[in-house]
Amino acid sequence: MFVIYKDEILDSNDIKKIIEENSKFNIIEDMSLRSKREDIIAFNMSIDINILNEILKDDGYDIDEEDKEELLDEYMDLADTLAIELERIMPKNSIIRVYSYKYDELENIIKVVFAMAHKELGDLKLNDVVKRLLTSVS
C-alpha cells in the first residue's frame, strides 16, 4: 500500500522488505489499510521465541529457572525493545510505536503491532492508531 510520508509517497512493501532483511521479525500482515489513515504504515509482525531465548541467555538469564509469567514478561519487553530499535533503519524523520500483544504457544512466537509515520503526525495520533489496531488483531 502506498502512504503519504510528508512530501513523499512510500510503499509499505518497501518498509516490509527493510524490516525482514534487517531484523529477526516476520511480517504477518500489512495493516496499513486498517489504520484508516493515508499517512501510516502498520504491520502485524512476529518474532520467534527461540531467537528471544538466545538473546536472554546471552544477557545472563537462566531460561529454565525463570517463572513462566516472568519469562513471558521478559519476552514481551524484549520483543518491544527489538521492534523499537527498527526506528534507526526507517526513513529519516520517522516515529514508530510498537506493542507486543500476544504469545502464540502453537507457533512459539510473540506477536507485535508496529506503526510508523512521519514525525509531524505526532505521538498522540500514532498512539491512537496503535490502540485501534490492537482491537483488530488476535
Image (tube, rainbow, N blue to C red):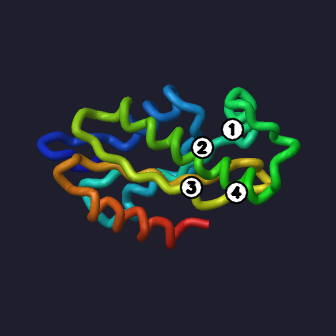
Labels 2 & 1 near each other (Cβ < 8 A)? yes
Q: What's the amino acid at mark 3?
A: Ser
**Which residue, given by chain and number where applicable, does mark 3 sit on?**
100
Label 3 neighbour load within 10 Å: few <14, some 14-19, many 20+: many
Of callouts 4 and 1, the N-terminal one: 1
Image coordinates of residue 6 in percent, x first then y, are 15, 46
> Mark 1 Cα within 10 Å, few/some/many (few <14, many 20+)?
many
Label 1's element?
helix
- Residue holding disc 2: 78
If you read the primary sequence from the N terminus, does the residue marked by circle 1 or circle 3 appear first? Answer: 1
Q: Which mark is residue 103?
A: 4
Splitting the image into 4 quarters, where does residue 128 fall? Answer: bottom left
- Judge from the rendering whether residue 63 lies leftward or rightward of residue 48; answer left or right: right
Give the numbered dot on residue 52: 1
Q: Amino acid at mark 1?
A: Leu
Q: CA distance from mark 2 to mark 1?
A: 7 Å
Would you say 136 lies left or right of 53 here?
Answer: left
Helix or strand or loop: what does disc 3 sit on?
strand
Q: Earlier in the sequence, mark 2 or mark 1?
A: 1
> Is the Cβ of the residue at disc 2 closer than 8 Å to that at disc 4?
no
The Cα atoms of the two marked residues, 1 and 3, are separated by 13 Å
- Considering depth in this image, is 60 or 118 the residue closer to the camera? 60
At label 2, the amino acid type is Leu
